[in-house]
Every structure is written in C-alpha cells, then in structure tokens.
Amino acid sequence: MDAIKSGADVFFVLIGAVMVLAMHCGFAFLEVGTVRRKNQVNALVKIIVDLSVSTVVYFFIGYMVAYGVSFMFTAKQLVGGAGEGYQFAASGYDLVKFFFLMTFAAAIPAIISGGIAERAKFWPQLAATAIIVGLVYPVFEGMVWGSRFGYQDWMVNNFGYAFHDFAGSIVVHAVGGWLALGAVTMLGARLGRYAKNGTVIGIPPSNIPFLALGSWILSVGWFGFNVMSAQSLEGVTGLVAMNSLMAMAGGIIAAMIVGHNDPGFVHNGALAGLVAVCAGSDLMHPIGALFTGAAAGALFVWGFKQCQDQWKIDDVLGVWPLHGMCGMWGGIAAGIFGLESMGGMGGVSFTSQLVGTFCGVAFATVCGFLIYGGLKVTLGIRLNQEQEFQGADLSLHQISAYPEEDIRS
C-alpha cells in the first residue's frame, strides 16, 4: 500500500507539472497574439529558451536556495535512498516535485517577457532570467513555502498566523508582476507609443485568435497550477477546483462589463481572476472566490488603462496590472474571504495576509529595479532604434513569422 501511495503521488504531481508546463505555451501564444507581426518569432523563442535556462539554473541553484535540497547524489539515492543530510522520498517523488515547482519558477521570466516585448535585447534578458530564477525568486519562495529564513515563524509570532499563499498569488504572480514593473520602467516605452505632446498612439494586437488561444491554454493549465499545489492525493480537494472555476468566471464577466466587451480585456479577465484566487483557493467559499475574481477582472481593466494612458508605462501585455496588481489583491483577499466569518475555512488572518503581501511586493519591486537597472548600465537592455523599427524577429533571429510573405514582397 505504501508503494501504491507513493507511486500515485508521483503520478499526481507529474500530471500537475505537465499541465503547468503546458501553460508556458499559453504564455507564448498570448504574447504572439498581442505583439506586432514583426516580433512574433521573438516571443516564441524567448518563452522556450527562458524555460530551459530556468530549468538548469533552478536545478543547480534555485531549489537549493528555496528548500535546502541538492540533487548532487546518485540516481539510486534520488529515487528513495538516503542522501547526505536528506532522505529522498520513494519512487522519485522529490524529482517530480522539483519538476512541478520549476514550472512555477519559470513562470516568472514568462510573465516579465510580456511586459518587455518588442524592444528588449535577448541575451541580457537571459542573464536576468538566470539571476531571478537562481536567486531572487527562490529567496521569497523559501521564505513562504520552504519555511526558511525564519519568515513564517516571525509572521506567527507577530500576527498570530503564518502567511498563506496556497498556489502563488504572491509568491509567483505578484513577484513576477512587480519585477516586471522594474524591467518595463528601465526599458522605457516602445518607439512611437507616445507622441511628444503625450498623446497615446494605439498599437493594436496582431492576432486576436492567437491571444485567445493563449488565454484558453493558460486557463486550462491553471487547474493543474492550483489543484495540484496540494502536492499529494491525500491533500487534494475539490474546493480548489470549484473556487478556481468561479474566480475565472467572475474575472471574465467583470472584465467584459468594465472593458466594454473588448476581446483583449475579456480573455485577460479570465487570467486576472485565476491569478487572484491562487492564494486562498483552498480556503474560500465559492461565492467568495467569485467576488475575488470579479474584483480582479475590474482591477485589471482599470490598471491597464491607467498604465497605458495616464502613467505612460508601456507594459505591452499588461503584466504588472494582471499579475502584480491582481496577485497583490489575491493575497489580501485570502485574508478576507478565507475567514470563517466570511464562510471560509479559517486558519488565516487579514493582518498576516496584508503584511505578507506587501513584503512580497516590496521585495520584488526593489529587486526588479536593481536587476534591470544594473543590466541597463552594464550590458544594455534595449534594442537600438534601427533594430526595434525592423522588429526583433529579423534583428535577433534573422527570420520572420511569415517568411514566404517576405520572399514575395
């Protein structure tokens, strides 16, 4: 029975890892559909290469920082033998757990990619990916999920409860979104985005079906992202699935209404709701999840318009409002709708959620400006004007998304 249980847990987490891995396809197509045709190849290449770099860096450095676990042992030890100072679980469970958590870590550069699209250099961004996935993200991940650095003990001692983030509203999404704010700010707006008098010049999406496909792939994969965060069959609960579904629906409806039926807002509204519900998806009543998602959908539309029109922050896919703002709301919402008095499961406090949320936001914001500010001064992070005008596809990859058309023209 123990062998069956360990094997079932391995398979359960493996399926979750594969579902989250598929979400990176969603990130890619969401960006491909949003950027101009001359930058579509670059979007595809960035996502898959960032994933590969993240895998290697997280294997050798990041996972050790977050959980204190190294894989520098024999294969026999990794599938259930005793390592030096660590007992690996049977059937290679620790290996699929790494796979699952690596896909979370790789989501950080995938999030940032959408904000810096169409004008960022390729190699400096890979350097940023290595720094973020190897050191920055694992530090906060370890603080919240790895019980390292005394953070959760400090939260309990001061506020009575640990900071609760079941599936990463703060650890993944808010951290990624607020890191992206530093990247986008350091890069500056795309050429021609704003006139000298401050007028906003529209740059329409290149392909709405691709944008919608990206949203659908992300939405489906998100149920692996959230439900499989239990990391064992014993801990799985249908409440997480129901709350994810309700939050997604709330986000779509609110974004449709507030965004006046704009297809970009509608499809991103689904993602806004799912971002926000991650933290408290195991605690909330489904009606609380619906409200959480609806508020996130409206917040995304407002935040995107403010960024582009008022604050002149050229965040191409709106990753700061989508992941940063909605993730921040999700961390706080877990401390509201997770309370027993609000129909939730309890075991959480508003104060601990508020403090934990703003710790994550402050940490990511400072790191984002430091990393991208440092790279800007040393390596440079932006394409030159000629390369940006020509497009990242031809400038960086020497081929466009539609090479036959280029030959004919």
Image (cartoon, rainbow, N blue to C red):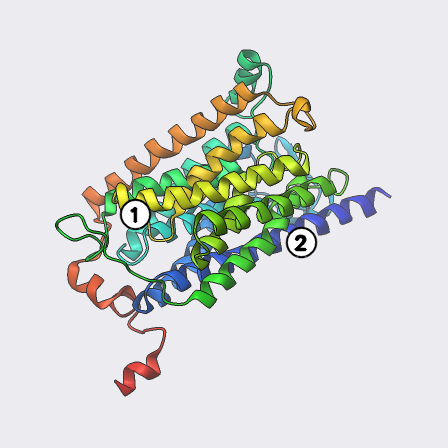
Quadrant of the frame with the N terminus? top right
Residue placed under numbered mark 1 in the picture: 308
Q: Answer whether residue 313 is visible to the viewer in this image.
A: no
Task: Identify the mark at residue 230; answer none if there is no mark.
Answer: none
Q: Residues within 10 Å of mark 2 (few under 14, many from 20)?
A: some
Q: Residue at x 58, y 37 (%)?
A: 291
Q: Nearer the viewer, mark 2 or mark 1?
A: 1
Tag 1: residue type?
Gln
Quadrant of the frame with the C terminus? bottom left
Q: Earlier in the sequence, mark 2 or mark 1?
A: 2
Q: Residue furthest left?
A: 196
Tag 2: residue type?
Ile
Residue 157, image x, y percentages: 56, 12
402 on left or right of 276? left
Distance Cα–Cα, label 2 vs label 1: 38 Å
Task: Identify the mark at residue 15; answer none if there is no mark.
Answer: 2
Q: Residue at x 50, y 40 (%)?
A: 296
160 on left or right of 57? right
Q: Residue furthest top?
A: 158
Rendered view: 90 above or below 409:
above
Rendered view: 249 above or below 383:
above
Rendered view: 244 above or below 409:
above
Foreground of the two, 134 or 27: 27
Residue 86, image x, y percentages: 64, 33
Q: Answer whether residue 409 is visible to the viewer in this image.
A: yes
Residue 258, image x, y percentages: 45, 47
Rendered view: 188 above or below 359:
below
Residue 393, image x, y percentages: 30, 68
360 on left or right of 290? left
125 on left or right of 268? left
